[in-house]
Amino acid sequence: MTIPRKDQPSDGKTNLVGLTRDALRDALVSIGTPEKQTKMRVNQIWQWLYHWGVRDFNAMTNLSKDYRAKLADAFTITLPEVVSRQISEDGTRKYLVRIAGGHEVETVYIPEEDRGTLCISSQVGCTLTCSFCHTGTQKLVRNLTPGEIVGQIMLARDDLEEWPEPGVGTGDAGPRLLSNIVLMGMGEPLYNFEAVRDAMKIAMDGEGIALSRRRITLSTSGVVPEIARTAQEIGCMLAVSFHATTDEVRDRLVPINKRWPIAELLDALRSYPKASNSERITFEYVMLKGVNDSDEDAHRLIKLIEGIPAKINLIPFNEWPGAPYERSSKTRIRAFADIIYKAGYASPIRTPRGEDIMAACGQLKSATERARKSRAQIAAEVGNS
Ligand code: SAH
Ligand code: SF4
């Protein structure tokens, strides 16, 4: 049985959102668009979708009425649905987004003084079981499609009213409200590589949303074989969930370490910046009281990353119901940051945002997918990974 998908509606129409330029061209050819017109038509429709944010074929005024009708017969422009929006005291917005099959993911918008970052999800749940992460307690339900991934950017732009208005402006003036993307929501982006790549290609395309590759950061728990591919095929900035300085501790915190231990991960990272022209890798390091936050850890970390252009982002642990860890104290985090800073690395301490609405790092988990993994299942997955 095929399950009807919201972004590929059951009326047989193809959703244009999330198609690569090549796939869009194929779609237009399939409705009889003459070959020699396809390049121009792709450009026109692409701009309507991703530059102007238009959702109605009738508004595509540089296309003939007949052609617009033909498009509307065969295609839709469909985004995932925003079920609810919560706004934190600090301005952070959390969207609960429903995708086909009734599943839900969360998307978080974090406004800052001179920019705004959208934290997007790539999977419903996660196959991995990092022991400090709320999403890790939720089973993987499915991978998101490219349309559902880029759709999160589009629905946030809708909510922020950031699409330019035809005839009024191009939207290029002034800092953007949504200026940066981080793939740090639910899921492991490198276990959904093709969909993430296609969605990010759309977000980076200069004729549309046009976010530079330097403003997109993909965070991985350390899927080593996909790291080189990320450099070659996406070319965005990379963050890695490092979190520990010995294999013994990292095995416990980030179980994928059993498959690709610290030394192998570091080898892959050493070749990343050159390949993608990114200046620095971000090492994410969650501060867990008494687990990974000692001075010795800080010194070990510096030794491990020697030679890698790096920034170390210290994340105070964000609690969630039933979490088996505590956040390190402020003085401990500062002392840790100081050691790293003195070794010549930027070591910003991430301010938790949107904690009051459970929107902070690692707190995301959809309310409809509460099924907790059993201990046996977690053990089996760790063993297999
Ligand atoms: N799956 C990817 C991206 C999503 S997690 C990854 O693991 O990198 C985004 C970041 O938040 C990761 O560095 C993750 O380790 C961190 N994180 C997870 N749970 C957290 C928590 N409870 N408190 C603070 N950071 C957490
Ligand atoms: Fe998955 Fe990342 Fe959470 Fe680990 S930290 S369980 S990889 S979402």
Image: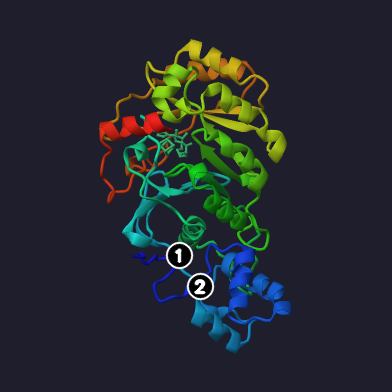
Instruction: Return the residue at label 1.
Output: 79
**Mark 1 CB in 8 Å range of ligand 1?**
no
Q: In percent of the image, x 45 and y 22: which residue is there?
A: 250
Instruction: Return the residue at label 2.
Output: 55
Quarter residue 283 falls in: top right
Q: Are marks 2 and 1 in contact (CB under 8 Å)?
A: yes
Classify the position of the C terminus by image quarter: top left
In terms of sequence position, does the residue under pointer 2 or pointer 1 come before the other?
2
Q: In percent of the image, x 59 and y 66: which residue is there?
A: 164
Would residue 264 appear left or right of 332 to someone viewing this image?
right
Q: In percent of the image, x 42 and y 28: which residue is there?
A: 255
Q: In which quarter of the image is ligand 2?
A: top left
Tally the numbered discs: 2
Tell me residue 290's x, y (percent): 37, 15
User: 134 or 101: nearer the eye?
Assistant: 101
C-alpha gap between disc 2 and disc 1: 9 Å
Q: What residue type is labelled 1?
A: Leu
Q: Is disc 2 placed on a helix, strand or loop?
A: loop
Q: Is residue 94 visible?
A: no
- Mark 1, other Cα within 10 Å: few <14 / some 14–19 / many ≥20: many
Tell me residue 325's x, y (percent): 33, 24
Q: Which amino acid does label 2 sit on?
A: Arg
- Mark 2, other Cα within 10 Å: few <14 / some 14–19 / many ≥20: some
User: 154 or 128: nearer the eye?
Assistant: 128
**Mark 2 CB in 8 Å range of ligand 1?**
no
Q: Is disc 1 placed on a helix, strand or loop?
A: loop
